[in-house]
């Protein structure tokens, strides 16, 4: 699939380590501004909810100009993605080098079940932020660098079906924030988790 496609990207030839979300590289003053903005945004989002907080409020709370905020993050979805970066890196490192079953050393089926549980923990803790980052524009979810990491990881663990890349997209579709948010009010977290735990076995 072409690199500039707005749909899901194939990463079948890319080592998983190279798909990690890289930490930002920036000057010291830019790093301080970034930290101040992210701290302010996290506090405001926790206190008032993501939808109720404006970029103007974040800029004021962080002590930076609105122009600086918009140039750096673009919009609230970009700010949400930046807030999620550090959380994503923690999960990625656990997958690459943490203890089994999430990390290496366990059977593929056990690692896949551990990934579903760990990803749900991350998703449910930051559901509004993930939802905003994934739905900011058509296809936004598939342009997020972390999606390519999750997809490659699941593809490797599903190396058995006729088309493991497609099967990996199918599993990740069930883990989309919009989908999970829609199910929670009717099914509750326990049933959502149980259903998603059963799904990998049906894809193998």
Image: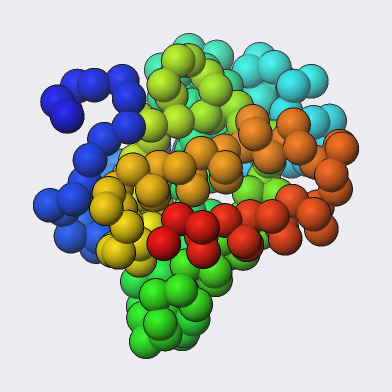
Is residue 70 shown left or right of residue 188?
left
Q: Nearer the viewer, residue 90 or 110?
A: 110
Q: Where is residue 61 in the image (x, y as percent from the top left)?
A: 70, 29
In the rendered image, which quarter contains the N terminus?
A: top left
Q: Nearer the viewer, residue 177 or 112?
A: 112
Q: Where is 155 relative to 24, above or below? A: below
In the rendered image, which quarter contains the C terminus?
A: bottom left
Q: Position of residue 19 (x, y in %)?
A: 26, 52
Q: Nearer the viewer, residue 88 or 59?
A: 88
Q: How many labels does the image show?
A: 0
Q: Where is 16 relative to 8, above or below? A: below
Is residue 55 shown left or right of residue 45?
left
Q: Where is residue 78 in the image (x, y as percent from the top left)?
A: 48, 26
Work out whether residue 198 can be spotted.
Answer: yes
Q: Which residue is drawn at 45% across and 55% down?
A: 203
Q: Which residue is drawn at 68% across and 40% down?
A: 180
Q: Position of residue 107 (x, y in %)?
A: 40, 82
Q: Where is 107 relative to 68, above or below? A: below
Is residue 27 shown left or right of residue 109?
left
Q: Residue at x 57, y 56 (%)?
A: 199
Among the 4 quarters of the image, the one containing residue 16: bottom left
Work out whether residue 22 can be spotted.
Answer: no
Q: Residue at x 74, y 21 (%)?
A: 51
Among the 4 quarters of the image, the one containing residue 43: top right
């Amino acid at each position: 699939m072409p690199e500039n496609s707005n749909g899901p990207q194939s990463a079948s030839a890319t080592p998983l380590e190279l798909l990690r979300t890289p930490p930002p590289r920036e000057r010291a003053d830019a790093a301080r501004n970034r930290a101040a903005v992210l701290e302010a945004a996290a506090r405001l989002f926790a206190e008032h909810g993501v939808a109720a907080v404006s970029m103007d409020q974040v800029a004021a709370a962080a002590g930076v100009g609105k122009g600086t905020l918009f140039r750096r993050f673009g919009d609230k979805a970009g700010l949400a993605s930046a807030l999620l970066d550090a959380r994503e890196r923690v999960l990625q490192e656990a997958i690459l080098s943490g203890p089994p079953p999430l990390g290496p050393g366990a059977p593929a089926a056990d690692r896949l079940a551990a990934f579903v549980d760990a990803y749900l923990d991350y998703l449910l803790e930051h559901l509004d932020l993930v939802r905003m980052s994934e739905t900011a524009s058509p296809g936004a979810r598939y342009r997020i660098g972390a999606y390519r990491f999750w997809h490659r990881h699941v593809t490797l663990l599903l190396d058995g079906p006729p088309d493991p890349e497609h099967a990996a997209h199918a599993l990740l579709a069930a883990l989309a924030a919009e989908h999970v948010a829609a199910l929670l009010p009717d099914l509750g977290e326990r049933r959502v988790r149980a259903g998603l735990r059963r799904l990998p076995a049906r894809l193998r």
